[in-house]
Image (cartoon, grey):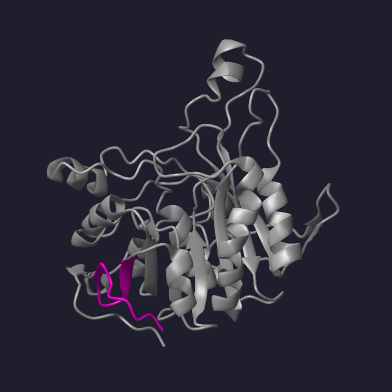
Amino acid sequence: MIHPSPFYSSSLGSAYLADSLDLMPQIEQGSINLIMTSPPFALHFKKEYGNVDQGDYISWFLNFARHYHRLLRDDGSFVLDIGGAWTPGQPTRSLYHFELLIALCRDVGFHLAQEFFWYNPGKLPSPAEWVNVRKIRVKDAVNCVWWLSKTPWPKANNQNVLNEYSPDMKRLLEKGYKPKTRPSGHIITKKFKDRGGSIPSNVFICGNNDANGPYLERCKEEGVKPHPARFPSQLPSFFIRFLTDPGDVVLDPFAGSNTTGQACEHAGRKWIAIERERSYLEASRFRFDLGPPEDENPEHGVVPVRASNSGRHRAKQRNDQPLLFE
C-alpha cells in the first residue's frame, strides 16, 4: 500500500509528487497488474525533463526495474516505450536500448513477451547533421516498445484490441471464399470466419501531434508550460485493454503529463502515477477536468478508448489523506 498523501486523486487513482525510487518501496509487493511508462531516453543532447548519458543509462534504469519486478503480480506486465539514440559525433546508432532490453531479461529476470514498434509519420527529420546537412541518413521516426513480463505467461487477451476489418475483408466475408493454399504455404480453410475484427500487429502508426488537443489548450489558457515529451494516448490505451481487466491497477513511475492515468480513467482501471517535477504534475490535472482524449485515427494497430459518462472522473486536489491500494 501507499502511505504518503497524493498530489491529486480521482475515484480510480492518485498522482504522487515524488521520486519513484523513494515511493515504490512503500507499494505492496505483487500488487500491480501493469507498469506502463516512458522514461527519459539516453539522448546525446540534454533535455529539460532530465536524461541520463548513454554510458550510465543501463545501471541507472536497473535501479527502477528491480522495483518493477517486485511490484508486479506473477501474471503482470511491464511495457516500456523507449526511443533510440545516435552515437555522439558519428552517423551510427547507439545500442543502449537493446543493451537495456538484454539487461532487463538477464539481470532482473523479466521475459520478453513481444516487441512492438511505434512509427510516428509526423516526426521531424533528425538528426539534422546526418539527415539535413550531410544527407547521408534518413529521419529516425520509430520508437521501440518492449512488452516484458514477470513470468512467461502474463495475462493478455488480443480480443480486447481487435481492429475493424478492412473494406476488402468485409467483402470477402460477405461473398465467401474458396479454401486454398496461399503461395506462402499457408492453408486457408473453411474455418476462417468473421470473428468481430482483425488481430492487430505489433506496429503502431500514429502521430503525436496534439497541438490543438484539450491538454495543450488548457496549458495555454492557464499559462502553464506543458510537458515537452508526451507519448500519444493510443499507446497506454492499447496496452491497458490488452493486458488488464477492469479494476486492475496500473503504475506509471515516470508519469510526466499523466497520459497513462487518463487512459486508465476511461478504461475503468485503477492507477498510480509518480512524477518528481511539480510543474508537470500540476499541468497533468487538466487531463482529468475533461472528457476522453479525441480520436487521432491511427492507421493501424490500435484504436483509442472511448468511455461512457459514468467512466469519467474529475480529479480533486488531495493533500489530506492517502489513497491506498491493497
Q: Main secondary structure of the magenta part?
A: loop
> For this view, does 272 lie left or right of residue 117?
left
| Residue sticking out furthest to the bottom | 326
Q: Is residue 275 visible?
A: yes
Asked whether residue 174 is in view, the answer is no
Q: Is residue 221 left or right of residue 8?
A: left
Whether the magenta-drawn stretch holds residue 180 is answered as: no
Displayed quadrant of residue 126: top right
Picture coordinates of residue 135 (x, y %)? Answer: 62, 13
Quarter of the N terminus within the rendering: bottom left
Q: Position of residue 222 (x, y in %)?
A: 14, 45
Q: Residue furthest right?
A: 185
Q: Nearer the viewer, residue 50 or 165?
A: 50
Outermost residue, left direction?
A: 221
Give me the residue at 62% from left, 23% from top. 138
User: What residue appears at the point 67 percent right and 53 percent down from the top-left corner?
Assistant: 100
Q: Is residue 152 above or below residue 83?
A: below
What percent of the width, then of the height, locates residue 136? Answer: 67, 16
The residue that appears at 56% across and 48% down in the rendered structure is 82
Which residues lie in the magenta part? 1-16
Front-lying residue, 305 or 225: 225
- Between 198 and 160, the one lying in front of the other is 160
> Residue 104: horizontal and vertical position, in percent?
68, 61
Quadrant in which residue 305 is drawn = bottom left
Q: Quadrant of residue 19?
A: bottom left
